[in-house]
Amino acid sequence: MTTGSFARLVCGRRTKWIVLALWIVVLVFAGSLAGKLGGVEKNDNASWLPGDAEATQVSELQKQFQPDDLIPAILVYERAGGITPADQQKATADAQAIAAVPGVTGQIIGPVPSADKAALQVIAPIKVDADGWDKIADVAGQIKTISGTGENGLGIYMTGPAGVAADSAGAFEGIDGTLLYTTLIVVAIILLVTYRSPVLWLLPIITAGAALITAQAVIYLLAAHAGLVVNAQSAGILTVLVFGAGTDYALLLVARYREELRRHADRHDAMMFALHRAGPAIIASAATVAIGMSCLMLAEVNSTSGLGPVAALGVAVGLLAMMTLLPALLVIFGRWLFWPVRPRYGTPEPTATGLWARVGSRIARRPRIVWVSTALVLGSMALGLLQLDANGLSQKDSFTSEQPSVAGLEVLGRHFPAGQGDPVVVIAGAAQRDTVRAAFAAVPGISEVTDPVTKNGLVQYEGTLQAAPDSQAAEDTVIAVRDALRGTGAKVGGTTALALDINEANKHDNRLIIPLVLLVVLVILAVLLRSLIAPVILMATVVLSFAAALGVSALVFRHVFGFGGEDTAFPLFVFVFLVALGIDYNIFLMTRVREEAREHGTRRGALIGLAATGGVITSAGVVLAGTFAALGSLPLVAFAEIGFAVAFGVLLDTLVVRSVLVTALNLDIGRWMWWPSKLTHQDPAVDAPISPAPLSQSERVLPQ
């Protein structure tokens, strides 16, 4: 089906009502299914870990030694003047009460006194099931209720892996609602400012909401019946992506529709022409995002690979809604939606003499100087990459606000071996038990090794780290243990080993997926623009924009926000979002420039394209930046960093790269941007260098 026939089907005089009715039916069924998405989220370890990593294999082998997947909750009792008999009695009573809590499985350890007699610790193993940290948070809450927070000089802290997991669950609690409401407010404010209409802004939001509900329903069905893995991270990003990308497509379509209403007396004809002209760019943009997100499926880290199909499905459903439901609604309600500035038939297009037309006129005076100086400025911003420290976040650096588990870790480290309660786990063949134990115990950084536990031909040891489990020293110790056990067939796991393997897997994913996304986007641009030169130049500008955004972000994180570093997945997520979403604006601009270049030449077409799309693309960029900035509402450093970097990068791409750098390159290179297509062979006189001048009347109201 061509875009012309599709446009007639969507917004015909009768078919528009059919489209609306079909969407109402879809939403009736999708509403109840979307509400069930949280019930199929998998936040257990397996949904976040790299599938084939050594530490993941150890997690699976541990099931032979204990039927349940357990993580320890550690209670620390501290009194500055020394633990009293009453403190000892309370800790003992707490341990007995905790043993009866549903979800606490196995032997309670403690209370164990510290060497300085100023602290006690109780270790309670908690069973991890398919509910992951949601179940852990419930059990941890009951343990906290039993122990209390201390009084009369006694401090009580919950920490350890279970304590950190409970705090993480609290950070993610209500993520869908928090992000949804924050995003709605941001988008509503920006659309009100953009449209200056008290009614029009509602339709893009209603359509984006319908798209989100439908996407959540589809993803729920796939998660429940087709094995799709969804966790809190992918579910949260889905909300941001559907509203951000969907509203972008809505802004482009509404802008072109408003433009065509000035050229067509009948609103149905105006919408059909708008869909026919804007549709290919919107479809190409959505395809770029969806395919770019799908590349994440190749990631080793399960949480990253699971995000790929979820994000791609969200964008696809968002595209469907914006290309069907939104046009039908716009045509049904008519021109009055644009009140108080209604686009009347025959009136001139205001963008022809607006801000972006004046910006283009200034760039046209010296385009080469403009693009060279802009590129140099962006390059200098990229120097901030020297401050980037994407080697993972420690537990104390993972939250934007102080968390009880982090405070507990500090107390634990003051009185006990920092790694106590969170051991390094080694599993080997039973025949190697003595060799493995000797080598394991001899590694510097391991303070003690447990007696062997043998089962099914395997032997398991646990070693206590001298360093904090989330420290670089602990990771170095794990690496040393693996080196010491090489050749014995032993595998090394535990929390520290998992963090180490996740970081290594993220680095592998960066090296694999970033070049792959670049290649995919390059091919899509070549097909869409029918050129080899333009795609290469556009990709170079996007990569430069990405480097500049990452450089500035690194400086802001370090010297303004005071963050301790970046997650190892940070560069990949920012790259995929910025390149896949940021290329949208180049697609919107360049498809319009190509359309105008057929009649006016590339240089004049570049000015017309900038004037016509500058306002809507800027608005779209602000909306997308606002939606990603909403991630900063979560108390998690990783999300705050992604939100800031993507928001800043989108604004940089919208206001500088697309409007200034790409336009200047178009003006300087001219028709050769389209090599080897027919536009390259256009009469050189048509595409001659131009002097800055207002757009002519024929360029303001293009022939139909």
Image (cartoon, rainbow, N blue to C red):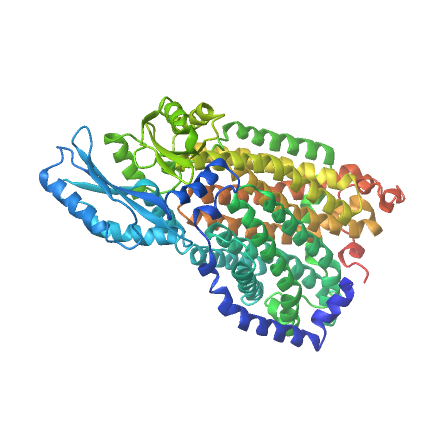
Q: Is residue 652 left or right of residue 474?
A: right
Answer yes or no: is residue 152 visible. Answer: no
Q: In x, y percent, where is residue 214?
A: 56, 64
Of residue 509 and residue 663, the one placed in the foreground of this image is 509
Res. 501 visible in picture? yes
User: Which residue is pictured at 53% across the width and 54% down the height?
Assistant: 238
Check the picture and name the quadrant holding the C terminus: bottom right
Residue extending furthest toward the bottom: 14
Q: Position of residue 488 (x, y in %)?
A: 47, 27
In depth, the one of 457 and 239 nearer the eye is 457
176 horizontally vs 356: left or right: left
**Figure quadrant of the N terminus:** bottom right
* Figure check: 241 above or below 8: above
List x then y, in percent, for residue 679: 85, 46
Which residue corresponds to the image point at 42% horizontal and 28% vertical from the top-left? 432
* Point 75% across, 42% down: residue: 692
Question: Which quadrant of the view contains residue 20?
Answer: bottom right
Which residue occupies the foreground of this view, 194 or 225? 225
Instruction: Name the spot of residue 483 as percent of width and height, x first.
Output: 46, 24
Q: Is residue 188 above or below residue 267?
A: above
Q: Is 265 placed above or below 156 here?
A: below
- Residue nearest the viewer, comparing 601 with 103: 103
